Amino acid sequence: MSSKRVAIIGAGVSGLVSIKSCLEEGLTPVCFEKSDRIAGLWNYSDIPREGDGGALYECLVTNSSKEMMYFSDFPFKKEYPPYLTPPLVLNYYKDYADHFELHKYIKLKTTVTKVVKSEDFSETGRWIVRTQEEGQAEKQEIFDAIMVCTGIYTKPFIPDCEGLDQFQGEKLHSNEFRRGRDFAGKTVVVVGDSHSAGDVATDSSRHAKKVYLSMRDGTWVVLRMGPGAMTSDQIANKRFNHVIPDSLRQFIVEKIVQSKIDHEKLGLKSSRRMFSGSVMVNDDIHNRIFCGSLKCKPEIQSFSKHGVKFVDGSEVNDLDAVVFATGYNIEFPFIDGSILADNFKDLELYFHVFPPRLEKNTLALIGGVATVGAQGPVFELQARWATRVFKGVASLPDRKPCWKMSGQKGNSLQEIRKTQSFFSSGSISRRNSRSDRCETKVLEGAPY
């Protein structure tokens, strides 16, 4: 009996681990990647390319340490530093693909144009996949299952701001930002309250005339290095921290974070408690504010031709540029929206993986979550679970309970804890999965 064929859409982080998971379960993966290289957004491009989602900038350093990021059976090299620059991360994923011989299952420069149910889907769960290799005619194949690995950083989101269309300065999303020196001598407003906003603002403040960081409700700034030169995420994700009551843990972490940076005096203070508001991993933003090159501002009220007004009534005139570090919307142009919706609000997924309304559980979204903590290990667990469901050695509940649970918006952490319990129950062998590396909270994904 021939093994089941699985179409994997995308050869980024989630795509690579999905290929390996298929092979481990005796499935035959065929991975389609529209670009000419693997590892997705970890490939730096100096010039923004049309259709790009998430993209790298020169000053980027990972928010998670290498001890939290690696896949269960392939650690980072010992000589790598605790936090990594993009070239080191890219090398890691290339080495991963080489080590497990994944390249032969990947078709580069091949775009998936359409995924539809086969005529006998209700009996077989099979899919028709149409693809087009660069310079070739479109072709069609039948697959037993689909793993969508295109990620959630696909469509840059810019909020509606009064007067933005009238503003005559430079307008861009953070996925177009590459280096702060491009704003040398300019006055810049950066909009956003998380990691990218902090990176763009601090890097630009070294070169610009003045940089303003506009946040809707402040943020909690966390430094990468903790006590004893340990990484902050290693300390935060000790299992003991999740045994104590949440309210006590919240109080302790707030005190530690506040002892490093006085959020209120620097204009960073959030009205929300830790774990319920925005978090920004940044080692230098407080220094840039302290020396006057960067200033925090509240939410934007409106733009004019050459300036911006904030909700507190203050204004910045002679504004040269605004950078929106306001997140992304999702997009699945190759499949019907009733299966995978093109917005977070309507996206229905059982445990953030399986569309619950399908008659057959033969399609999985891998990597369709934003996490507080490293993403790679989460994607790995998703892929291992999905491939075992495809193989038939793991099963999902009846469709009605699946649908009900998929609609429990705002209860993501509870769902993930249940999922971790499922993984540790024997349905999937732990195989040194090191689930203690992070208690991962899945975000709803609403941008800005």
Image (tube, rainbow, N blue to C red):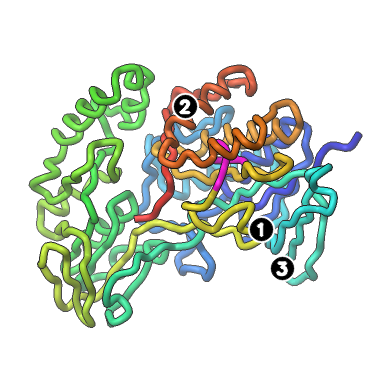
Query: In which quadrant will I find the N terminus?
Result: top right
The mark that comes first in sequence, 2 or 1, is 1
- Residue at 21% x, 60% y: name it: 299
- Residue at 13% x, 51% y: name it: 267
Could you tell me what secondary structure mostly forms the magenta stretch? loop
For disc 2, the neighbor class at 10 Å (few under 14, some 14 to 19, many from 20) is some
**Kind of residue indicated by mark 2:** Arg
221, 440: nearer the viewer: 440
Residue located beneath label 2 in the image: 417
Numbered circle sitting on residue 335: 1
Give the image location of residue 45, x and y in percent: 48, 63
Residue located beneath label 3 in the image: 134
Residues rendered magenta in the picture: 348-354
- Residue at 39% x, 44% y: name it: 62
Q: Please, what secondary structure does the residue beneath circle 2 have?
A: helix
**Kind of residue indicated by mark 3:** Glu
Q: Nearer the viewer, mark 3 or mark 2?
A: 2
For disc 3, the neighbor class at 10 Å (few under 14, some 14 to 19, many from 20) is some
Query: In which quadrant will I find the C terminus?
Result: bottom left
